[in-house]
Image: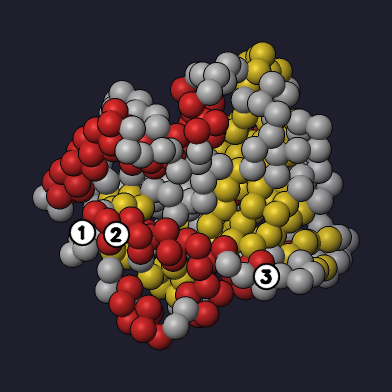
Amino acid sequence: MGDMPVEIQPIEGKVFGARVLDVELATLSDTAFEAIHTAFLEHGFLVFPDQFLTDAQNIAFGERFGELEFGALPLANRKKLGPDSYGDVVRFDSQLMRTNLGNEAWHTDSTYWPVSSKCAMLSAVYLPNGDGATELADTRHAYESLDPAMRARIDTLSAYHSTQFSQAADVANFPEPREGTIYHGEAYLRPLVKVHPETGGRSLFIGRHAFAIPGLTREESEALLSELLAFVLSDETRVYRHEWSVGETMIWDNRALLHRACPYDYSQPRVLTGTRIRGDVPSELAYYPQDPAAEAGRQALARELELLRAEYAAGTRAPRLGERVLAG
Ligand SMILES: [Fe+2]
């Protein structure tokens, strides 16, 4: 059969994103993948309706973009027991739900690992009563829209990234650090302005895991990071809310976009199958834990966590996602 041209339909009223029609990801030709890859770099995220990918097909499509961090894992409020078999909805006060809740704050994936993520895929399996959307924001458009003075100010700045920091700051959650988990005690320094390794375009590289900009006080750093995030979100043409349909697959570029999960009825099952593609080492590596540069990150994180604990204990700080995250 000849190659049908892939139809790329940009999202109306937004500066980014597209729906891809007339394509079956499970049986994708190289020509069709080329068109999809080009559209992915241009639009930042792509939605593929009616795919109903199996885990193996999910992994195979992800691998076309690069080496996987993980393939076809349930990003869910239920444990996966076997193929298409899930346990009960987990308790709201479990660590899994604390981690899920944290993802309702804007972020880029895996900036808390030595090599941060290239892109991420989600496929909708179970949805709670039409709820539980995913939102995305275009930080390329935000960077280009910044005033020149702000650009000049941030061009040479970096921030540490840690999900122990973001869990503490967003949901007042202080999981016990353990090597091999995402709560590993390290923090990775990354530039605030990212140069995309494939397009050369610039974007704001911020989000919930970022803290402690070297050269700034703690207050200045926190204020600048929240000012930049507010700026990204201040223009609705660069923020998109995706209401899921079962069977859909979405992929987004973690080097160009922020995203977050949206609140839903946590007593209802929600399962999205997630596949995450590792970034290319030359552009996405900060450093490894054994490198001398890692020491400053560990110290910055330890200091920050101590301050956050003290502020919560003194009642002078509320979690960034609000008090409701302490309920249950
Ligand atoms: Fe995420």
Residue at 36% from the left image edge and 84% from the top image edge:
149
Placement of the C terminus among the 4 image quadrants: top right
Amino acid type of the residue that numbered disc 3 sits on in the rendered structure: Thr
| Observer-nearest of 11 and 217 | 217
Number of residues whose C-alpha sits closer than 10 Å to that of mark 3, classed few (under 14), some (14–19) or many (20 or more): some
- The residues bearing labels 2 and 1 have C-alpha atoms spaced at a distance of 6 Å
* Placement of 120 over or under 125, stated as above or below: below
The residue labelled by disc 1 is 217
The answer to whether the residue labelled 2 contacts the one labelled 1, judged by CB atoms less than 8 Å apart, is yes
Q: Can I make out residue 248 in this image? A: yes
Residue at 11% from the left image edge and 50% from the top image edge:
292
Residue 184 percent across, percent down from the top left: 29, 33
Amino acid type of the residue that numbered disc 2 sits on in the rendered structure: Ser
Q: Quadrant of residue 283?
A: bottom left
Q: Can I make out residue 25 in this image? A: no
Discs 3/2, front: 2
Q: Quadrant of residue 289?
A: top left
Q: Say left or right for 325 vs 221.
A: right
Residue at 79% from the left image edge and 69% from the top image edge:
12
Q: Say left or right for 162 vs 16.
A: left
Residue 154 percent across, percent down from the top left: 33, 73
View extreme (left): residue: 292
The residue labelled by disc 3 is 237
Number of residues whose C-alpha sits closer than 10 Å to that of mark 2, classed few (under 14), some (14–19) or many (20 or more): some
The residue labelled by disc 2 is 221
